[in-house]
Structure formats: structure tokens, C-alpha cells
Amino acid sequence: MPRKMRYLSERNNGDYRYVRDFPSKLLRAIPNHPKQFSKELGLDRSCTDTQLLKAMEEATRIYDLRVKTATNSDPNSFSESELKMAVEEILRQRKLRVGEYAHVPEKQYTEEEWQRAMEHGAVIVPDKYDLAEQAIPEIEDIGYAEQRGAKLTFKQQAYADAWKALQTAPKFQKKQTMREAWARYISDQKIDVTEGDGKDKQQRFERVLTYTGDFTISQETREDVQDRIQNFIYGKRQDNPSITAQSIKRELREFIAAIRYVPRVDWGDRLKLSGNAFQIPKEEKPIKGRTLSDDELRLFFSTCINKADPKWTALLLMAHAGLGTKEIMRLRADKDLFLDAKYPHIIFRGGDEERSKVDSRLRVVPIVLGLKVIKANLPQTIKWMNSVDKKTPNATLNKRLRALLGKDATTKSHMFRHTWLRLSRRARISEDNKHAIAGWEKGDTNNTVMERVYDIHGYRDDPELLAQLYEDQKEIFSRFIVDLSAIGNVVQLKR
């Protein structure tokens, strides 16, 4: 099926290209300027979404650079990364590469040698300078301009640098631009920026870069890098005075990790948000979810089952082990749900990315309350969570909880985690089984129970281990299982 994406065009043979009209303001100012920008992406329908998105982003950057180059000739108005990109584009268009002629011998022929060659038909092998000049003929006019003392335009500087690049062997970069550092970081960390957490990280990176601009990371640029990060902090607080320290640090976490990833920059490891390197507001103590009383739980479970829909089902599942919305969003119906098993359970592996907040959160959750409701509604729950903004599920579910149990700020979905821990202590289940169900870091993280979480076959060969967890989960919720089977549809909450 053809992909629909702005500026993406598909040729008759299935190849993709980027096609975009230049701004009308530019065309009015420069009447003979091409009306349209087009770039072959080197991809077709068989490419992945990640490959296509990366190619489209690169084409957009080249388009933006073309527009900027046509309307602004001052080299000082361009970043170092923009100059590098312009050089790369010149070489790409001419089917050349950096260091193309670096190993060609440098031989200066005398006029006598040239004359003798002309007379006898000898072949004069051009040296690297001749070859580079043939590839970048613009260098001749640039040389005359420099002799006159004229200031080079950005376009001339790009051609001059491309001419030099042809004659210089590629070597290890002791400095990188921020965009280059980020590209290498996400590539080596296998971060998919087209979906999930990877997409969130890419969006945070772009937000920070809006305030810092692109810049160079090298052994000599420590203070400049710190100043730019501080500019982000100042700018963000000015635009949003109520922003918290936690939010600022979350925005900068991966950004700084990418800076530290640049090799041979010994100050990178010392670049931290703690201490006095940056001025960040004092962290606010987060509002922790409280624990629910038994009476509140009875009302809650009764409501989830008697008013079942995808949102109440989400809350019912969360209560089984203090689950978070992201964990539910990542569930895969064909790989993680075992609701028809002898001991109904769900394995939380982190979705296709196989990522969870920490490894200890990989876990198996036996379902002992409202199985029919969860089976009937969970697919719609997952679909709803993935169809809305990432902040919407928590906000919606917290609103429901407060309408049912009181509007106190501590009434939120995170309280199920504290509540499950209280109930598990009351049931006196083992630390290992507590860890396997709810993902606390205490206990033996290498026990056989956890190994089954990683196994694609789950508990197929070890049903007795699953039985242990299922019986413990039943014990944790035993009084509510009994109550739900004995009471009617209405439960009165004791205040």
C-alpha cells in the first residue's frame, strides 16, 4: 500500500523521492530560481518506516538549507553543521566522496615536460589538484575572489571546502556537531525514533535544540556547550514559569547522554545536572499515591465489573499489580496475553521494543478478578491507549478514580502499586514471587520465575511455577474475590 506523507512522491517504478515547491517569496525575489526541489531518496516500498522517516528528515534539512542559501549569502549566518551538509550535498550531486583524490600522487610538471608530452602524444596523469579542479571548477573563480581580498559567500565557501575535502583522506573526527552526535548516539543505542519512547526522545531533542541551536562538541568547547544548555534552562523557565526541575532534567537527560557519547572529550563524563554546573530550580517533592482501604477496593472492583468498558478495564488490570499505562500500551495480543490458560495470566515484556522502565519490571501478572471483563475489553483498552496523546490515558483514568473515590491529589492510578504491596505483605507471599508479579528490585532477579518471563513460550514447560504465582495472587485478593461473588451490584462505601 502506498505511504501517505507530505512531500513524498512515488515514481511509476516504485522509487521514492522528496518533492517540494520553493517558497513563492523566494521565487519572486529570484525569478530564474528553480520552482521545485526534488531529491531521490534511494528507497522504495520495501523500506522500513524508520528508513523512510530518516531519509525524509534529511531531505527536509537539505531543502531548508537551499532556501537559506538562496536568501542569505553571509557565511556567519550558517552553523558549522549546515556548512558540512552543503559540502556533502555538493559531493553527492557530483558522485564524489570525501578523500576521492587524497592518495593521488602530487606531481608538478614543468612547462618543458608538458611540451614534450604534447609533441610525442604522451599521457600526462593529472595530480590531485588537477582532478579536484576538474570536479569543482568553481574553485578557479573562488581563487580569483580570494586574490582580490573579496569575502567569500556561503556557497563559495561550501565549494572551496568541497574542493579541499576531495584531497583530504577521511580521518577520525575529534569534534562533532550536536546533530552528528545525536545521530550516532541513537544509531548505536538502537533507538527507533519513529515510535514509542524513541519518538518521545527525538521530540525532546528537537525541543532542546530550538533553544541551544546546533553547536560543536570538542575538547575546547566545554564552556560554550554548558552556556547553551543553560540557555535552554533559562528559556524554558521563561516560557513556562511553572515548569518543574524534574521536567527540565527529563528534557535534557538523553541530550546530555549524546554529548557524553562523543569520544575524546574528557569533560563529557563530568557534564551533570547535579551540583553547581547549572542553575535549575529545586526539585518539588512528587505527590505519591496513597493506599486504598478495603472498603474503597470493594467499591472499585464492583464498579469495574458492573460498569465494564475499556477504561474501567484498564484500571482493573492496573490494580492486579500496580501496573502503569505504558506497560499496558505495549501489550501484544498474540504474544503476551494468556487469558485462556489454566492459570490466566499476562506477561509484560515491554512490547516489540522489549523495553520496560527497568529490567526488574519484566513480570507475569496472574488475573484473578474480572477475567471475563478483561478478556472482553482489553483489546479495546490497548487500542484506545495507543490512539490518543501519551498523557491522555493517565489523566482520563485519574479523573475516573477521583469521581469514584474522592478528589484528593493522592487519588491516582499509581496508588495501586502501594496498595498491591500492602496486600501482598498481608498475604505474606515470598520476595521472589512478589518480585515476579510486581517487579520490585528486591529478591533473586535470576530465579527461574523470571527466566520464564523472557522465554517466548512463557510457562508452557513450567506450569507449577505459574501455579505458585496464581495461588499467591488469589491469596492477595482473596477477600475481594469472595465479596464479589457474594454481593450484588451495589456496594456502599464507608466514610
Image: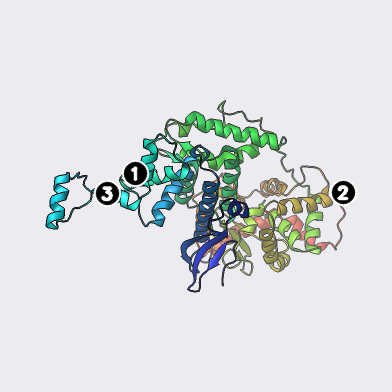
Asked which secondary structure carries label 1, the reply is helix
On screen, residue 40 versus residue 373, left or right, reads left
Instruction: Name which of mark 3 and mark 1 comes first in the sequence.
Output: 3
* Residue 444 visible to the viewer: no
Asked which secondary structure carries label 3, the reply is helix
Q: Position of residue 131 (x, y in %)?
A: 28, 51
Q: Position of residue 441 (x, y in %)?
A: 56, 45
The crowd level at tag 3 (other Cα within 10 Å; few <14, some 14-19, many 20+) is some
Q: Which of the two residues, 60 or 288, is positioned nearer the viewer here?
A: 60
| Picture layout, residue 453 above or below residue 104 | below
Q: Residue furthest top?
A: 276
On screen, residue 142 versus residue 399, left or right, reads left
Identify which amino acid the numbered label 2 is placed on.
Lys
Residue at the spot of label 3: 130
The crowd level at tag 1 (other Cα within 10 Å; few <14, some 14-19, many 20+) is many
Instruction: Name which of mark 2 and mark 3 comes first in the sequence.
Output: 3
> Which label lies toward us, 2 or 1?
1
Q: Report, in whole angstroms, how far the alpha carbon at label 2 lies from the one at label 1.
A: 81 Å
Residue at the spot of label 1: 164
Q: Residue at x 47, y 37 (%)?
A: 216
Identify which amino acid the numbered label 3 is placed on.
Asp
Instruction: Name which of mark 2 and mark 1 comes first in the sequence.
Output: 1
| Picture layout, residue 416 above or below residue 279 | below
Q: Report, in whole angstroms, how far the alpha carbon at label 3 lies from the one at label 1.
A: 12 Å
Tell me, for residue 494, which label it has, or none: 2
> Which label lies toward us, 3 or 1?
3
Q: Position of residue 281 (x, y in %)?
A: 66, 30
> Which label lies toward us, 2 or 3?
3
Q: Residue at x 88, y 54 (%)?
A: 492
